[in-house]
Amino acid sequence: MANSPKRSQRVAMLAEVIGLPDLADQAHNGALRASLARPGEERALIEDFRRLSREFLNVATRVGDELRDLYNSAEPKEQDRPFFDEVFPALNREANKCSRGFIKMLRFLEVGLEVPIEGGETMTIRGREAVKAVDIYEAKHILRMASEELLNRFPIDETAAARAMAAGGPANFNLGDTTYMGHYFANITNSTIVNDAVVIDAFKRLEAAHDPEVAQALLRVADAVAASGNRVAGAVFDRFAEAVLEPNRDRSKLRELWDGLVAVMPDAAVVTEAASTIAKLFL
């Protein structure tokens, strides 16, 4: 699984997909801050909101223009395409709702919002009440859900790498349907990189199945992943250990996860040496 230019582009784009809902929150909060500005602070806060909303629009436009082609470049399974084709338009739709909402908020901050009153007259409201008249909370919620669902349509190692890129190497991040919180594993260099309970349970399961060679190889790889300090590798390895624990192991899933681990730790000698032994799980 080479680190090709297309793969790098996908990881970078996925990092933007991850960050898009947060950008929407930041821009929305910027509008609310501007709406509460004290006299003399309004202009600076409005300009800050303008910058945040423009940044959101730029990222949403890039995602809308490029994500489908990058998804196709990953050669997805045919059964996954209908799901992408349903969720991707939803992401674009809700991003557009947020962008239109920000444009309205900016206008209301600049000139106020005229509302009808009795007698056919109108009055202008300003500040927080004007901004609150634009409701984008549901759009932001759906945008976040669509973002997360789309991530799970891409190769697991690319998604993990994108999460790390988006968060600058976080201690805690979500991978698939599991959130990794940096549990301690006292027997592997006291690391917070891998999940102690999952690895120990997988080790016991393999030993009970009279497969001590694979069980020991699993621990050696866990040790190498922990010592590497590579949190992306730790997340992928945790998923691999969880898959080992499943009553009816999915060999294709195990192979995919192992390939993902190799992709994010290509120079790890222990991983390379253990490959032939670990491969017994999915061959």
Image: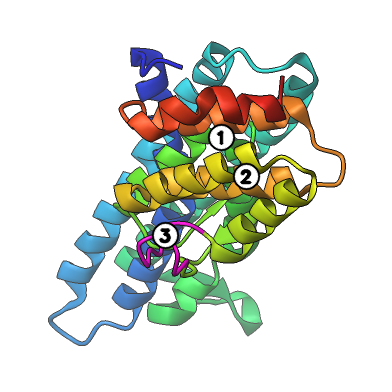
SS at badge 3: loop
In front: label 1 or label 2:
2
Q: Secondary structure at mark 1?
A: helix
Q: Position of residue 247 (x, y in %)?
A: 86, 46
Q: Residue at x 38, y 53 (%)?
A: 226
Q: Earlier in the sequence, mark 1 or mark 2?
A: 1
Dot 2 crowding, Cα within 10 Å, few <14, some 14–19, many 20+: many
Query: Which residue is tagged 3?
Result: 188
Mostly what secondary structure, the magenta segment? loop
Measuring 66% from the left and 43% from the top, which residue is drawn there? 212
Q: Which residue is mark 1?
A: 156
Residue 53 in percent (x, y) is at: 35, 52
- Which amino acid type is shown beneath numbered disc 3? Ile
Give the residue type at disc 2. Ala
Q: Which residues are magenta?
A: 185-194
Residue at far left of view: 40
Residue 242 placed where, x, y %?
68, 50
Report if residue 60 is visible in the image. yes
| In this view, 164 is above or below 120 | above
Q: Which mark is residue 33?
A: none
